[in-house]
Amino acid sequence: MATLSGKFLALSGGVGGAKLVRGLAECLPPSQLQVVVNTADDFDYWGLRICPDLDSNLYALADLNDEQRGWGLRDESWVTLEAMRRLDDGQWFQLGDRDLATHLYRTQALAAGQSLTDVTRQLGERLGCPAALLPMTEQRVATRVFTDMGELAFQEYFVRERCEPRVEKVVFDGLDTAQLNPAIISALADPALRGIIICPSNPFLSVDPILSLPGCREALMQVNVPVVAISPIVSGAAVKGPAAKMMHELDIPRRAAAVAEYYCDLLDGFIIDSADAQQCDDIAQTGVACRAVPSMMTTLDSKRRLAEETLSLIEELV
Amino acid sequence: MATLSGKFLALSGGVGGAKLVRGLAECLPPSQLQVVVNTADDFDYWGLRICPDLDSNLYALADLNDEQRGWGLRDESWVTLEAMRRLDDGQWFQLGDRDLATHLYRTQALAAGQSLTDVTRQLGERLGCPAALLPMTEQRVATRVFTDMGELAFQEYFVRERCEPRVEKVVFDGLDTAQLNPAIISALADPALRGIIICPSNPFLSVDPILSLPGCREALMQVNVPVVAISPIVSGAAVKGPAAKMMHELDIPRRAAAVAEYYCDLLDGFIIDSADAQQCDDIAQTGVACRAVPSMMTTLDSKRRLAEETLSLIEELV
């Protein structure tokens, strides 16, 4: 693939989005890739600020993530967690010993008055992250999931209850008064910006918080560069996580095309898996350029190839 | 040794004091032993509240301490510390992975509004501590060491600078307005109280903060039970830590008898090592009953024997 000029801005949730982000970082030098990361999943545990999506992207980009387990760091150990279980047997979230350093460092820096953006940049520099990660906002936003077993904090739903409750509604506390990270506004105003990529993350839990920040959707639409999303739904199922289950519960058809419809007038292009190629016509009819390609990112090579397809579709749409 | 009736209150600093406390716990059931612990060494590291002396006593009493290393927990690992070094290479304090759970638990509980006394009790219950540990105060006190390299926070002097600077003065910030832990006042008012033991801790750094709390020295003297101290100085040297070095720097003779003089009219009895037996007459001349016994606590058995000698001297003095 020829070297691309210009800059690219990716919007990412957690592990699923981070796979494509890793692929993008294989195609683009650090100066050309910035990643807007959802922080609505952030929460406090053991008194520490945990930013699951920032860390998923950080670890994946720094090639420190555990692909087998699917989350967290490779070569992780769990000594502190075991010791915490002795002190309090109600532990439902797993923090590994290496991972813990990230949370301790961040919590301490935030308490000292540093911004989440600055702390994230420092973590990226120290761990060797080859792209800039931008928290979507500096303010605290908290995803609340209303389910058939009541209202749950996001991680309670996602980790403790393993996404089993039926979702009725998702609310992002604090979003109304949160402000889009100024670094994102700068990135959008950069004349070198060439394309925006919505990663194959959960549209409702990971991308929605970003898009719903006051002014964000409008800002993305005003920028005169292509916006391309990649479907997290393949053959009617989510590659990872509860996206398809939630679509069913929210009465949205479990099709890749429904994701394109959900993003609606924001999109210029949409990438679906080859297995769903027959949906391309439906999508194209809404005025969105559609490309069907192998989209399963099981290897570094497949991540790079999907990133190349994404960047190539953007080039076509410029 | 015959079963003793009544309750005993020990005043302890860190590792040295904790050895005798462990011996006392071998002689006395949990209901008969309370330990007042210095908290002037407490500080924040990685955003966590670290209480070195409380933990030294906790771990020693729960038989979790590492006798070989001389501090911290047995079977400890250092994964988080290594990861923190990658994020910030200025690490000068060592927190182990198991130990970290204690600090995380405590910091979180304190932030939730619990008292240090309550948190300490919970930690003791969870870890199997066979005596009640009482922080000397609920308020924060910070030891500042004035040295030939300037003013240092206690742990900077003790750990980072390895006690190498020459000490000119020791100041306990916050002590003037701190209040003696009400649980200690209750313990002193308990008619079952039979004796007070000043452990062989550093008089200047560990025992002084406790005794200097407003009203503490007076309260100890008003209680009509024997007060017995054990010398931390043996053959002119400190068994552990900088006590002897500090005595030299503060122009105090490096003798066990000088420690008895330092505690002065508080003491009814004083225990020195057999090696210093010739000092007993000097001490007795000040009206303090002196006993010379083997005082090196290298084994559990020697801890128990020194505790027995201490309790037996108290019995004599009642």
Image (spheres, coloured by chain):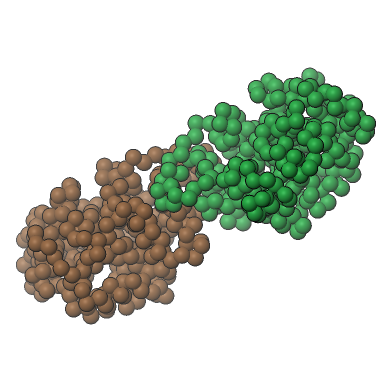
Chain colours: A green, B brown
Reply above or below: B247 against A9: below
In the foreground, B99 or A15 = A15
Reply above or below: A177 against A200: below
Image quarter of residue B306: bottom left
Image quarter of residue B1: bottom left
Q: Position of residue A216 (x, y in %)?
A: 81, 48
Q: Residue at x 41, y 51 (%)?
A: A87
In the displayed orientation, state which residue is furthest to the bottom: B222
Q: Position of residue B152 (x, y in %)?
A: 41, 58
| Left or right, B50 with reference to B226 | right
Q: Position of residue A193 (x, y in %)?
A: 83, 37
Q: Position of residue B53 (x, y in %)?
A: 33, 57
In the foreground, A27 or A51 = A51
In the foreground, A253 or B317 = A253
Q: Residue at x 58, y 52 (%)?
A: A44
| Left or right, B276 with reference to A185 | left
Q: Residue at x 33, y 71 (%)?
A: B183
| Left or right, A25 with reference to B165 | right
Q: Is residue B93 visible?
A: no
Q: Residue at x 43, y 66 (%)?
A: B115
Reply above or below: B107 against A316: below
| Left or right, B152 with reference to A299 | left
How many badges with numbers are in the image? 0
In the foreground, B237 or A91 = A91
Image quarter of residue A59: top right
Q: Is residue B190 visible?
A: yes
